[in-house]
Image (cartoon, rainbow, N blue to C red):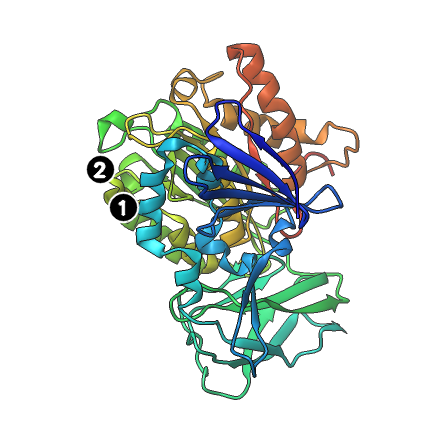
């Protein structure tokens, strides 16, 4: 049933409200469906969906829609929730432009790469997972083994992704041993308190993810070994491609590691830092640093990744530009950058259960890429892919060059927060936690940039898992 119909002000679009709770947009000239919006009656959850399958959703909105796949008159149908297609079809950048007249070439390029949702659904369903471990349990030790089964369906078996308290654990590109066994086992080292251990599996095309199975484990253990803080800081001021050169990125990386090293006691037994500056921060050098750290870090340790340089969004994903990237076209950018899949793989190798990513990257003005909120959306997708807490700002090139007090402005605010300002709010307790630092940056960065440049720079805060302290302001 149609409740209401109207025309857009320019006459290009027909907008209709339907009895199923959706509002839909159509092209007036040929009646082609362009976009649909569904808002849940709770007023909090919503989802926007294109006919091709691309979507943007509020937190929790992904669960509102999906696809029913008929199996014939004698078999029960299968349902694929839209969040099972998140990796390919969560594209707020495309949804935001779906009503534009010039979007068709961009859509065509995306669909040529991945196909529309009907083609992806035809690649086959991911395996079925069944949990053998108790759904909820209590124990006294930190060691836990997840026991589950995996039953292939018509889509074959692809990568298996394990998460502990939201963070990806292990290399998600590696196929686990024993896939032919009736039951699979995977060991974990937990934290004291409540832990969520989950697993999902993709079909062999990597296009459809299974619903997760989750075991909740409560650990009644008060003490763990005092952690070591490991920091990997990348700072690139002078690029091989000099058109990308910045002013403060390398010195900001040095300032960040110096501060974290200086204030490491008494929270950490030691602070181990690895800094890659300018020509050291090649793609191969960054991968080598991750692999070296992965061999040393223990699950109870803390890991901080700091990025300062150029970052861009391409095809809905975040890309950090290493020193040796020379941009010729979109393919060279993808091949030569630290893109989402590389972050997912390399961070998955880091066993630290408490980790955070601090991103101070500048939009690469020398690259012919769109200037939209796309980087913020891409960073949100990076948080989803890795399960790590992210505090980030994507800065216009002019602001990055001008800087503030000898730093890029976002890093300046981070440093102030870590020096203790983040603990000066309503409930100071002598500790600067990741959550407090994010809150401080969210409040202070827009205020500072508005006062200096008349422009509010809005940072991204994507929290995942438990918050943890980075600095003890007072005992």
Query: Measured from the top left, where is residue 153 in percent x and y?
Result: 47, 79
- In the picture of the structure, the residue carrying the numbered disc 1 is 336
CA neighbours of label 1 inside 10 A, class few (<14), some (14 to 19), many (20+): many
Location of residue 32 in the rendering, given as x and y in whole percent from the top left corner? 44, 43
In the displayed structure, 370 sits above or below 221; it is above
Residue 326 has which mark? 2
- Tell me what residue is drawn at x 48 percent, y 23 percent: 10
CA separation, marks 1 and 2? 8 Å
337 left or right of 373?
Answer: left
Query: Outermost residue, right direction?
Result: 427
Quadrant where the C terminus is found in the figure: top right
Q: Quadrant of residue 397?
A: top left
Q: Residues within 10 Å of mark 2 (few under 14, many from 20)?
A: some
Q: Residue pushed farthest bottom?
A: 182
Q: Is residue 128 left or right of residue 469?
A: left
For this rendering, which residue is in front, 175 or 141? Answer: 175
């Amino acid at each position: 049933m149609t409740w209401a119909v109207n025309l857009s002000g320019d006459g290009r679009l027909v907008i209709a409200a339907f009895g199923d709770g959706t509002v839909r947009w159509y092209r007036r000239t040929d009646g082609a469906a362009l976009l649909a919006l569904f808002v849940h009656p709770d007023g909090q959850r919503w989802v926007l969906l294109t006919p091709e399958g691309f979507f943007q959703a509020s937190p929790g909105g992904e669960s509102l829609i999906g696809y029913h796949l008929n199996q014939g008159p004698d078999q029960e149908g299968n349902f694929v929730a839209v969040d099972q297609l998140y990796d390919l079809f969560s594209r707020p950048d495309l949804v935001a432009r779906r009503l534009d007249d010039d979007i068709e070439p961009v859509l065509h390029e995306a669909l040529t790469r991945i196909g529309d949702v009907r083609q992806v659904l035809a690649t086959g369903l991911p395996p079925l997972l069944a949990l053998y471990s108790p759904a909820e349990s209590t124990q006294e030790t930190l060691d836990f083994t997840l026991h589950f089964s995996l039953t292939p369906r018509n889509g074959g078996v692809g990568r298996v992704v394990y998460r502990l308290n939201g963070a990806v654990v292990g290399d998600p590109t590696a196929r686990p041993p024993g896939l032919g066994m009736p039951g699979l086992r995977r060991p974990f080292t937990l934290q004291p308190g409540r832990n969520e251990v989950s697993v999902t599996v993709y079909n062999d095309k990597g296009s459809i993810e299974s619903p997760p199975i989750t075991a909740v484990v409560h650990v009644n253990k008060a003490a763990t070994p005092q952690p070591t803080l490991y920091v990997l800081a990348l700072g690139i001021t002078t690029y091989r491609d000099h058109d990308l050169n910045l002013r403060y990125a390398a010195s900001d990386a040095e300032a960040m590691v110096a501060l974290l090293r200086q204030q490491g006691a008494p929270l950490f037994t030691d602070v181990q830092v690895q800094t890659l500056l300018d020509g050291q921060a090649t793609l191969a050098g960054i991968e080598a640093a991750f692999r070296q750290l992965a061999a040393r870090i223990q699950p109870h340790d803390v890991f901080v990744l700091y990025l300062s340089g150029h970052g861009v969004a391409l095809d809905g994903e975040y890309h950090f530009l290493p020193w040796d990237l020379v941009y010729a076209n979109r393919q060279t950018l993808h091949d030569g950058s630290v893109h989402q899949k590389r972050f997912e793989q390399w961070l998955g190798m880091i066993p630290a259960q408490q980790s955070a990513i601090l991103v101070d990257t500048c939009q690469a003005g020398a690259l012919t890429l769109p200037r939209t909120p796309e980087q913020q959306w891409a960073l949100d997708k990076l948080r989803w892919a890795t399960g790590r807490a992210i505090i980030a700002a994507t800065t216009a090139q002019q602001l990055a060059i001008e800087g503030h007090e000898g730093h890029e402005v976002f890093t300046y605010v981070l440093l102030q927060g870590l020096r203790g300002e983040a603990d000066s709010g309503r409930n100071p307790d002598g500790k600067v936690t990741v959550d407090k630092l994010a809150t401080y940056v969210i409040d202070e960065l827009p205020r500072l940039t508005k006062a200096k440049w008349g422009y509010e720079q809005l940072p991204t805060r994507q929290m995942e898992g438990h918050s943890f302290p980075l600095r003890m302001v007072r005992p």
